[in-house]
Amino acid sequence: MKKALALLGVTATLAVGTSASAQVVWEDNFDSYETGSAIDGQGGWEPWEGSTLVSTVSDTQARSAPNSIEITGADDLVRQYTDYTTGVYAYTAWQYIPGEGSGAISFILLNNYPAAANPDWSVATTMDPGTGLVTAWDGETLPLTTDEWVEIRVVINLDADLQEIFYGGELLVAKTWTGGIADGGQLNIAAVDLFGSSVGYLHYYDDLSLEQLPPWGACCFETGTCEAGDPIDILACQDMGGIFQGIGSSCAGSTCFTLGDDGWILPPDQIRDDAASSAGFSWGGTFPTSTCGLGSSCDISSSDDIAFELVVSEDAEYVVSVCTAEYDTVLSIGTAPCTDDVASEDDSPGCGTASEWRGDLAAGTYYITIEGFGGGSCGVFNLNIRELCPELPAPGGKTYIEAEACGDDDNGGCNMAVPAYEPLLCDSINRGTAWTDGATRDTDWWEIVLTESTPVTMTGISERVATVFGIINSGGSGDCVDATAVAPAVAIAPCYLDEPAVVTADLDPGTWWFFVATEFGSPVAIDCGDLDAYEFSLVCGDSCVAAPDGDLTGDGFTDFSDLLEVLANFGGGGPAGDTDCNGAVEFTDLLTVIANWNPAP
């Protein structure tokens, strides 16, 4: 195979990191204002044009003592800026949302303000404890963090008309600045808007700042090496034949792929970790995402192509997809470069003229080729690789199976016009299904009545990532009015074979609802019958203590007393007899005792 230089699809992306030479051009920590005072007229802060609501300087919560700004109800607090029309900046705000909050509030940056001048939004993100999500107004989501300070950071390149929005250090969305919400905006940082909304709840901001960043960053080379720092900017990196990783990026924080003789080499460790996540591994970012101009390196067809070397670390079912490609693609997978002995996909169902393959791959090395159908076909693509979990083992004889059939809505709890619930008992194992079409998801509400204060442990496993297991924060009232969030909650990741989701709580007497559903805004659809099952155990009382040596009784020996504990609780949910604390007493627990047999002399 001929090696092609695949540098023509480079785009200048941004990064969350900053350089030591970054310059703070504005900041406010609210500590110079009198506690309890109205912020209107202080430090340039004002209500949104036409609003009469005034926010308050508060010491109830503070990231930097003594004060923060308190936003409540329909508060709509604005701070304007001037003369930020060129260069690269990082806007940072720290946000605190109490866990009992209900409703949606927004953090907004505008490129044009005030309203009389047709304001344009560049950044608009909504935080809603009811859904447990941070949501960009164009649909991207991240899990919401409550009861602690979280960083919101927006890196803005006004010279390139680009921005990246980070929440808690995780990228939420990357897009243009002038078209952040709607086209026609300006290359200008005009204002920040801390918006409570009409159904908003009490929350806080602190330590807001605007930094100007130097244009330097990391430069990756096709050998897998990296250089960074002054004076490497995007032009210098391109002159050296590299791929610029973004302003403020570092070599330590960048993944530099190697272009080998047989294509771009995908690191096995990264593939394993990313592919097993719900979104999967995605190729792209600063690396080539268009085949146009790359030439034809393989002889499968005469169209421009790009190739990858994929090392699969374990036998599993995989999805390899370029389903979102903007041109007519052919996807080939082979055991040797430029071959298709594993798969050749053209127009795949649900992908139009783009391609996707799903099937089993044994551990080993594979070669992926992406090309156009016909000699002149080329375009933009995104390669996505996902590893799927195997099916759950058959349920044990004591496992309760939910009565709701997949696709029906018989136990959606407070999400239903007439609430209905699945019955739940202490010390039980329960199995159900969870589906989503990407817009609508199945939510299962399991109801238990506790007559006394009880510590509980919910241990969940699933055929899909990420499935959310949690407890509705109703306080045990049994009243949907009090059901505003799933808290506490844990999402299982990356697969039930690796680690279960464990939720613990001390519950007062009352009627409690346990919640199971796919993650909100799942990046993939989950159809009924297609790896849709989940299972969880509920233990009331003492939580499980793992016994990897089989010594369940803790007497220093693995003997008949331990064997009898497994047999007496076989098929139950533990904790008695559950050596690995996976919420099920099963054959693996029996094998653990036998394999570690060590009776007293």
Image (cartoon, rainbow, N blue to C red):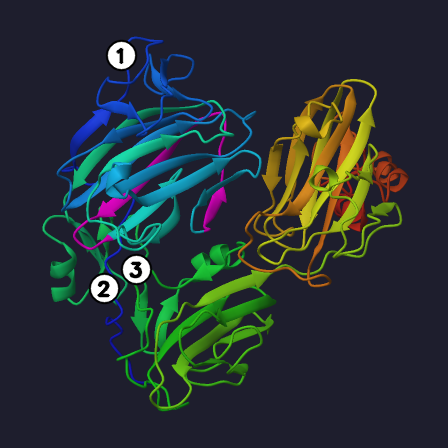
User: On the image, numbered disc 2 is attached to which residue?
Assistant: 221
CA–CA distance between discs 3 and 2? 7 Å
- Whole-angstrom CA distance, mark 1 to mark 2, is 50 Å
Residue 241 to residue 477: above or below: below
Cβ atoms at labels 3 and 2 below 8 Å apart:
yes
Q: What residue type is labelled 2?
A: Phe
Image quadrant in which the C terminus is located: top right
Report the amino acid beneath label 3.
Cys
Helix, strand or loop at disc 1? loop
Which amino acid, by three-letter code, is at mark 1? Tyr
Mark 3: secondary structure: loop
Q: What residue would you read off at disc 1?
A: 33
Q: Is residue 62 above or below residue 359?
A: above
Closer-to-camera residue (437/288): 437
Q: Residue at x 36, y 30 (%)?
A: 194
- Whether tag 3 and tag 1 are in contact, CB under 8 A, the answer is no
Image location (x, y in percent) of residue 479: 73, 27
Q: Nearer the viewer, mark 3 or mark 1?
A: 1
Taking depth in this image into account, of 525 and 408 the one nearest to the observer is 408
User: What range of the chain is rendered magenta?
Assistant: 139-161
> Which residue is tagged 3?
256
